[in-house]
Amino acid sequence: MTIDINLLAWREARREKHTRRFYAVMLLLLIIGIALGGVVAHVYQRALAIQEQRNAHIATHIERFDHEIAEAERYVQKVEQLSQQLTQFQRLFDERVQTPQLFNALASSLTEGVTYRRLERQAHQISVSAVADNERQVSEQLRRLAEMPGLGVPLLSEVSSGQDGGSVFHFEVTQTGQRSASVDGGGSP
């Protein structure tokens, strides 16, 4: 007696069960992969959005700082202009003080018989033309000018005879710019 067992149906059912299980696992892995891909994409999108916000924030600060730098440069230019004006005012003030000092020094050193004809000043260099009755008065005048505080040693450049028999002489002297105690802010304490 032989029993014939047909395993074909059982194998077929088993193969179909494995195939369904395989497709179910593949579908499950596909769903997990899509979900995982979606999560990763969402994380990257979120990170990108956060970085774009940071970039926008930094760009806003850069614009503000550029504006502040431009404003600071304008202030620096204004300070430089004011510094130049202050320097010019100081120079004018010094000239205002030095001019009377110069005339006082020239007047107090004037030797009898000497007359100043022309006086020209460029910065601290003074060019003078004068007339004297004789050459002794010329040398006396130059000696007295050299002794005056606030004036340097005069340099005689020319001596010639005048029309009325006197001596016409030209000299240059440097004003050293000494200020009086009252101009500097008072005398010593």
Image (cartoon, rainbow, N blue to C red):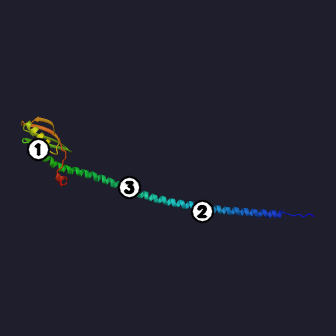
Mark closer to the chain start, 3 or 1: 3
Tell me whether circle 3 and circle 1 mark residues in contact (CB < 8 Å): no
Quarter in which the C terminus is drawn: bottom left
Residue 172 position, x and y percent, is: 17, 40
**Dot label at residue 168:** none
Asked if residue 60 lies left or right of residue 76, the reply is: right
Asked if residue 170 lies left or right of residue 13, the reply is: left
Amino acid at pointer 3: Ile
Mark closer to the chain start, 2 or 3: 2
How far apart are the two marked residues, 1 and 2, measured between alpha carbons? 101 Å
Amino acid at pointer 2: Val
Residue depth check, mark 3 versus mark 1: number of the one nearer the observer: 1
For mark 3, what is the residue? 69
Which quadrant of the view contains residue 3? bottom right
Residue 179 position, x and y percent, is: 18, 49
Asked if residue 137 lies left or right of residue 123, the reply is: left
For mark 2, what is the residue? 39
How far apart are the two marked residues, 3 and 1, measured between alpha carbons? 58 Å
Tell me the residue at 33%/53% (across/down).
76
Foreground of the two, 78 or 155: 155
**Dot label at residue 109:** 1
Q: What element carries label 3?
A: helix
Which residue is most to the front?
Answer: 189
Foreground of the two, 176 or 74: 176
Q: What element carries label 1?
A: helix
Labels in figure, total? 3
Tell me whether circle 2 and circle 3 mark residues in contact (CB < 8 Å): no
Q: Is mark 2 on a helix, strand or loop?
A: helix
Tell me the residue at 13%/46% (across/down).
105
Q: How packed is label 3: few (under 14 Cα within 10 Å), some, or many (20 or more)?
A: few
Tell me the residue at 60%/62% (across/down).
39
